[in-house]
Amino acid sequence: MTGELDEAVDLGVRLLSEAEGMTDEIVDCRRRFHQFPELSLEEYMTAGKIEGFLQALPGMEVFKGFGLQTCVIGRLGGDLPGGALAFRAEIDAVEVREDTGLPFSSYDDRVSHVQGHDAHMASLLGAATLICQHRDILKRPVLFIFQPAEEGKGGAKYLLDADLAASFNIEKMLCVHWVPHLPYGQIITNKGGVTAFSSKLHIGLTGPGGHGPTPYLTSDPVYLAAEMQIALQGMITREVNPEKTVVLSFGRIEAAEVYNVIARETHLWGTLRATDREIHKLLKLRIEEIAKGMARLSHIAASVEYMLDYNQVVNDESLVSDVFKYGTALIGNDAMELLRSPLLLGEDFSFYSEQIPSCLMFLGTGMEYGLYHARYDIPENLLPFASAWSAYLGLLL
């Protein structure tokens, strides 16, 4: 075993050195993705860049449009025996106006990569380049899946429904997700659940509407929406064991645009997340009961809808053990950490983990602003390390 790990470390050191030599190319790749973001299912320009990059790599097979039009998959060692090891990177952006002031900021005021998908794509393309350079020692086929529509659209499910796992004989899956509030440069993961059960929530409130000076002649959905948020947060603090991790947040509220008119309709859009499946199911029922009950008392009609559910990403124990074995040999125990409790991320990587032995890892960036913040950015000096890390695992697992 010592000889095997010594050889693994030698390989890892070479990959880290080679990745450092590719820094300018990987950073430039990230910046081009960052400057031209595209929303879910609209990633045509992004997919074209990825396709062109992969096609330029010797020995790389490229598959365009599998499951979704903007999906791009690269495969190395397709003629090798055994099941494939697959990496996943997300390619879509989100509707957040960027405020970083970067010279390569998003050209579109509506859309940005403030969740790090630009870094995920660039570092995986760097890993593909490194593995391609060492394809003579590949043990099995390796896939690079550039997946569209991760942001609230469940793109992973479309690929799996198109029979991704069987079509490419996938045996294992890996994913590296950059997270700002975790320590810089640390790889953090664990066996079992590592993310939350997550639901996208919409509450619609409808009343007769009326003039602002005469609220007593109508019913007020805007006022009810404010009361409802307080009531729902109170429900969580009083009905859920505080040892359980739960979050309910409303990030978007819509009502009338006229300042002196009581709106006929008010819409609340939010997210519900919990690390316990049964708590998550219970809260979905209680939110509906409370929302409709309060609306009935206020003479307002209410609807509650859950548009998309992500289950918890559950890491495969054996795969995580292998990741830690090779990881600690290369970067040491201090740089490899066990996740103390699942993060409250909603991840459609959960669809993969339900069908394929998987490992979702988090790369800490130690940055000030969190995911989806208008000023979110990534430390670009971590890009070569991320590429080398994925290439290292791709050549060993």
Image (cartoon, rainbow, N blue to C red):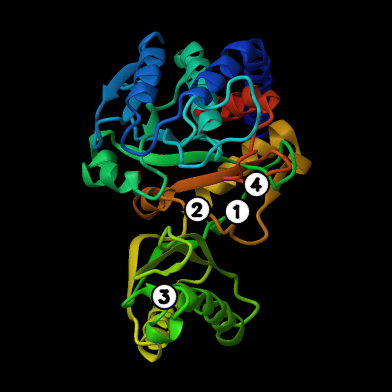
- Placement of the N terminus among the 4 image quadrants: top right
State the separation of the CA atoms marked 2 and 4: 24 Å
State the separation of the CA atoms marked 3 and 2: 43 Å
Which amino acid type is marked by label 3?
Answer: Pro
In primary-sequence order, the first of circles 2 and 1 is 1
In primary-sequence order, the first of circles 3 and 1 is 1
- Camera-near label (3 vs 2) is 3
Which amino acid type is marked by label 1?
Answer: Asn
In primary-sequence order, the first of circles 3 and 4 is 3
Asked whether residue 203 appears in the rendered view, the answer is: no
Q: Is residue 331 left or right of residue 71?
A: right
Q: Are marks 2 and 1 in contact (CB under 8 Å)?
A: yes
Q: Secondary structure at mark 4?
A: loop
**Nearest the eye: 217 or 383:** 217
In primary-sequence order, the first of circles 2 and 4 is 2
Rendering quarter of residue 206: bottom left
**Which residue is disc 3 drawn over?**
221
Q: Are marks 2 and 4 in contact (CB under 8 Å)?
A: no
Identified at 39% across, 24% down, the residue is 46
Few, some or many residues within 10 Å of mark 1 (<14, 14–19, 20+): many
**Which residue is disc 4 drawn over?**
370
State the separation of the CA atoms marked 4 and 1: 22 Å
Which amino acid type is marked by label 2?
Answer: Asn
In primary-sequence order, the first of circles 3 and 2 is 3
Q: Secondary structure at mark 3?
A: helix
- Camera-near label (4 vs 1) is 4
* Residue extending farthest front: 213
- Camera-near label (3 vs 1) is 3
**Which residue is disc 2 drawn over?**
315
Q: Secondary structure at mark 2?
A: strand
